[in-house]
Image (cartoon, helix red, strand yellow):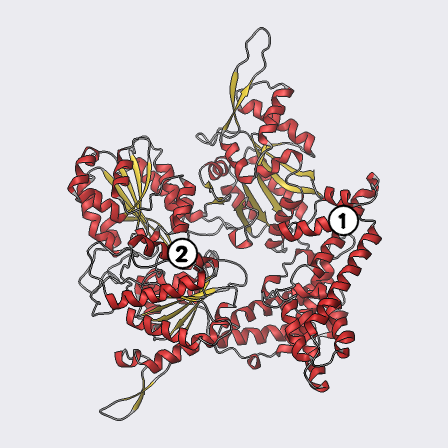
């Protein structure tokens, strides 16, 4: 039985959309697109008749700006000054492009195979037009093809042809990709990765992945219009974001609760699933309801770091006042034009309990206020909850949490707290960690327990294992702390796939933190490239909780006025901040509250950007802090229930294919606590979903996959004689499986190449063949030839290693030149194999091999290898440059400009720029193949001589 073709899938979808009351329209090209747009805008704006000059003015207005600027134009109206006619004076009419208030009242059409020609001519599969504008683009692949290929195709269209035809396809708000079996959607954002594509689900988080099933729900005209008008967010950073299904259902439930009830409620969405965006979107919609006086979005001050403040202001400009001044909040409360206020729980409590503020806001007590509390599991929220209820008599309260307080985890060490249900009532929507992992919205955890210590019992004189014993003298012993630091220094690069990711280290107390920091500093004192260690902790004197219950107490960067200060801790912190200032050229201190808070913000930014390798903390940053680049948490601290899940979840944000899991390295036995926490916040069978399997399981999987690979290609050489593309596809698929498993395996401290059925050299050899097949597909000379391998994602990011570049190879060559001939020959093969197996070095392979074979043997051990290579490389580059100019009749000065522009802007030359660089004007019929050939040669030159060179060349 044959597989359903892409054509059949496309026709079936169009017929389904027609039954859903989309009007079928034929649009082949730019001319037809513009004619249809004119007609649809006339209908949408009350059957207005536009003259051609008027339409041209509308088109000029539409054809401006970036994707985000066009998204704003789409949602706004255009003041069209009409021409005087038939004795009537000129008038101004306001042209609507999209009805956002009555979203069903728009004109819906479907077309297919629209052709647009920019850098290249492309045809788009299925386009949904709303009021004549292409707002939804659907790209299909035959059943069995990989979905990521459709995603990559969309990215190609964005760069090649979406700016053609008056740039109307830059008005696309949502993309949908499908192979019939799997269907995903995502917002129009050029810089996103495949990880930012989403499945649609029903309210109970059941996936609707079949194209027909998905279309029946998601593509209903009213629903798709609502997703665009209400649930696509425009940020100030120049990004469109679309809500995921659980965010949509939660927001809809909250809006419905405000419209039809005065009851409170809460939303349980797991940590890392985007609660802040959901709650903010709910705030935006609720504030527009007639019965609502104001919406207050309430966070903890420590969450108002740089990124969060920036994001909040992006959604509602100037809504965040990050100062500690309660006066500003009181002013906002009294300003009737301010419908949405983002404030901190500290300022809110000040406003309603301090007499000098009360007189100014008492008149608001009976107004309809809606409060939305972010991270409502926080213990300090319970302290002000009653104050808010007592003051705002007509308030409706909603909470968002990733880890609710249940009876099981309500004990804070000093007595029972109320549960989340006690405070807020019904849970309106759940999206637990198991759901998020299944949807690939967060990652699984790899938890390793490191450290089995021998302890001599004083009574029995018997050595016992103390993995389960919490003895303070053992846990705080200098020898133990030193061994842990040694372990981290030895394994950090492996855990974080340095320099790709970063880590956090949470410890039990400030005293332990100080010891750890000083050990890191001492042991790295003479290291050429030490890890960048930073730390922050509160220096206010607090009584330690004697129960050490593992629930992460609140620790704010604010030191309350008049608070007792632990001077010893403060002095140490100032010393550590001094190290930080020396490292980053900053000037922070604990001298005043604002400088310390600025230090807190700066650390947050640098952890997110990857400038800090390990952040050492006690409690700060363990809740509410998001950094996709953070993938490892070292733990020497008792954690349990919501404290454990919150801390672990710092590591499991989605980033890219290389980040396959969050790594948790425990130096205490938290296994029972981990199992209890996962069970509490998901279900009793969740461990298999949330936690990675043991190391041995992945070794077994790798070895089984190796057997399957060897059945297809018993030797490396046999890959070259695979009979056809089907056999090559089988090889590529099996080897890619090995890549994925090895990506996980290499993060385990137990990892040894000798455990694997395929030794390291064989793996590299097969990897080189895998890349050869990739290169063959990408360099196919006949663009019309269809290959099944083009429907495969080769996942090159799992092969790319940032540190392997020409500079790295040069350092190996320096050492090679000093070896005896036998050892040099062996090392030479290893270097050539390394070059063959690295994506960014493959274009340089022939030149590097030629240098090793021809030039290196002529050098003496005392000669400067790097200087010789640089001379050889410069000569080769000049020769290649001249050859390119001569072969394609290119003006050398113009080519130099194109290469300099690439180095500056990281953008390949456009078609017209290539034409302008030629010494002749190509004929119309010759133009397209010439441009493609020259573009490919310039790209090859850049890959060889500019990209991946490293800092030493």
Mark carried by residue 893: 1
Asked if residue 792 lies left or right of residue 186, the reply is right
Q: Position of residue 214 (x, y in %)?
A: 52, 46
Earlier in the chain: of badge 1 and badge 2, it is 2
User: Residue at point 45% right, 52% down?
Assistant: 206
Q: Dot 2: what SS?
A: helix
Quarter of image, res 360: top left
Query: Which of the two residues, 714 or 581, is positioned nearer the viewer here?
Result: 581
Name the quarter where the C terminus is drawn: bottom right
User: Residue at point 53% right, 76% down?
Assistant: 699
Question: Does any portion of residue 880 appear in the rendered image?
Answer: yes
Q: Position of residue 241 (x, y in %)?
A: 48, 45
Quarter of image, res 593: bottom left
Q: Position of residue 554 (x, y in %)?
A: 27, 59
Query: Which of the two residues, 944 or 100, is positioned nearer the viewer here?
Result: 944
Query: Which of the two residues, 896 or 692, is positioned nearer the viewer here?
Result: 896
Residue for badge 2: 602
Crowding around mark 1 (Cα neighbors within 10 Å: few <14, some 14 to 19, many 20+) is few
């Amino acid at each position: 039985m044959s597989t359903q073709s892409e054509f059949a899938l496309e026709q079936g979808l169009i017929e389904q959309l027609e039954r859903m009351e989309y009007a079928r329209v034929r649009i082949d090209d730019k001319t037809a697109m513009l004619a249809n747009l004119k007609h649809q805008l006339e209908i949408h704006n009350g059957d207005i008749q536009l003259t051609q000059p008027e339409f041209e003015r509308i088109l000029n207005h539409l054809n401006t700006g970036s994707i985000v600027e066009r998204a704003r134009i789409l949602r706004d109206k255009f003041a069209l000054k009409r021409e005087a006619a038939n004795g009537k004076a000129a008038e101004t009419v306001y042209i609507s492009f999209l009805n956002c208030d009555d979203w069903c009242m728009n004109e819906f059409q479907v077309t297919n195979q629209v052709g647009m020609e920019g850098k290249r001519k492309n045809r788009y599969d299925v386009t949904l037009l709303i009021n004549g504008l292409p707002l939804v683009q659907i790209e299909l692949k035959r059943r069995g093809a990989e979905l990521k290929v459709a995603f990559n195709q969309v990215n190609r269209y964005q760069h090649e042809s979406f700016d053609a035809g008056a740039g109307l396809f830059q008005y696309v708000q949502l993309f949908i990709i499908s192979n019939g079996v799997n269907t995903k959607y995502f917002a129009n954002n050029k810089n996103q990765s495949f990880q930012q594509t989403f499945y649609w689900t029903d309210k109970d988080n059941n996936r609707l992945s079949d194209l027909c099933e998905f279309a029946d729900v998601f593509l209903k005209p009213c629903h798709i219009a609502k997703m665009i008008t209400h649930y696509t967010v425009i940020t100030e950073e120049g990004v469109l974001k679309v809500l995921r299904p659980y965010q949509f259902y939660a927001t809809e439930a909250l809006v419905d609760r405000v419209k039809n009830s005065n009851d409170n409620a809460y939303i349980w969405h797991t940590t890392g699933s985007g609660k802040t965006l959901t709650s903010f979107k709910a705030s935006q919609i609720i504030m527009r309801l007639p019965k609502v006086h104001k919406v207050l979005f309430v966070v903890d001050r420590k969450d108002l770091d740089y990124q969060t403040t920036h994001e909040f202001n992006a959604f509602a400009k100037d809504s965040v006042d990050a100062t500690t001044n309660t006066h500003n909040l009181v002013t906002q409360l009294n300003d009737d034009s301010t419908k949405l206020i983002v404030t901190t729980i500290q300022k809110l409590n000040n406003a309603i309990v301090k007499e000098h503020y009360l007189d100014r806001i008492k008149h608001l007590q009976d107004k309809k206020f809606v409060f939305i509390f972010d991270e409502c599991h926080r213990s300090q929220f319970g302290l002000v909850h009653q104050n808010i209820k007592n003051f705002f008599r007509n308030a409706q309260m909603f909470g968002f949490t990733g880890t609710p307080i249940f009876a099981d985890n309500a004990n804070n060490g000093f007595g029972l707290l109320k549960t989340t249900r006690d405070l807020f009532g019904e849970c309106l929507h759940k999206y637990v960690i198991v759901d998020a992992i299944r949807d690939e919205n967060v990652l699984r955890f790899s938890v390793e327990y490191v450290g089995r210590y021998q302890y001599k019992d004083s009574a029995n004189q018997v050595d016992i294992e103390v993995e389960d014993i919490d003895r303070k003298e053992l846990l705080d012993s200098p020898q133990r702390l030193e061994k842990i630091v040694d372990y981290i220094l030895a394994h950090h690069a492996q855990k974080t796939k340095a320099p790709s990711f970063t880590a956090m280290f949470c410890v039990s107390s400030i005293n332990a933190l100080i010891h750890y920091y000083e050990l890191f500093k001492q042991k790295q004192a003479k290291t050429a490239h030490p890890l960048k260690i930073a730390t922050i902790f509160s220096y206010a004197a607090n009584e330690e909780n004697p129960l050490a219950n593992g629930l992460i107490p609140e620790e704010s960067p604010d030191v309350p006025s008049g608070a007792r200060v632990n001077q010893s801790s403060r002095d140490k912190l100032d010393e550590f901040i001094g190290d930080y200032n020396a490292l980053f050229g900053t000037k922070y201190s604990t001298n005043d509250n604002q400088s310390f808070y600025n230090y807190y913000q700066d650390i947050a930014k640098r952890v997110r950007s990857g400038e800090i390798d390990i952040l050492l903390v006690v409690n700060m940053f363990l809740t509410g802090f998001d950094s996709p680049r953070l993938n490892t948490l070292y733990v020497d601290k008792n954690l349990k229930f919501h404290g454990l899940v919150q801390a672990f979840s710092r590591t499991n944000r989605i980033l890219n294919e290389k980040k396959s899991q969050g790594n948790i390295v425990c130096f205490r036995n938290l296994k029972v606590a981990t199992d209890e926490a996962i069970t509490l916040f998901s279900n009793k069978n969740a461990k298999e979903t949330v936690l990675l399997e043991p190391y041995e399981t992945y070794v077994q999987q790798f070895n089984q996959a190796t057997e399957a690979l060897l059945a297809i290609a018993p030797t490396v050489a046999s890959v070259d004689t695979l009979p056809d593309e089907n056999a090559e596809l089988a090889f590529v698929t099996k080897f890619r499986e090995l890549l994925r498993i090895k990506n996980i395996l290499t993060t385990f401290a137990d990892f040894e190449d000798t455990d694997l059925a395929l030794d390291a050299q064989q793996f590299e050899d097969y990897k080189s063949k895998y890349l050869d097949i990739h290169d063959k597909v990408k360099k196919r000379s006949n663009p019309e030839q269809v290959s099944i391998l083009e429907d495969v994602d080769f996942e090159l990011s799992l092969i790319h290693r940032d540190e392997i570049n020409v500079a790295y190879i040069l350092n190996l060559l320096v050492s090679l030149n000093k070896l005896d001939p036998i050892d040099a020959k062996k090392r030479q093969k290893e270097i050539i194999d390394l070059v063959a197996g690295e994506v960014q070095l493959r274009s340089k392979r022939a030149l590097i091999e030629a240098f090793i074979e021809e030039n290196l043997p002529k050098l003496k051990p005392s000669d400067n290898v790097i200087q010789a290579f640089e001379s050889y490389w410069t000569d080769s580059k000049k020769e290649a440059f001249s050859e390119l100019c001569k072969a394609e009749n290119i003006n050398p000065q113009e080519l130099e400009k194109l290469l300099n522009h690439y180095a500056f802007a990281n953008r390949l030359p456009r078609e017209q720029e290539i034409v302008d660089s030629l010494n002749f004007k190509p004929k119309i019929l010759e133009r397209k193949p010439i441009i493609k050939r020259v573009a490919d040669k310039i790209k090859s030159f850049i890959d060889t001589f500019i990209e991946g060179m490293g800092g030493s060349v």
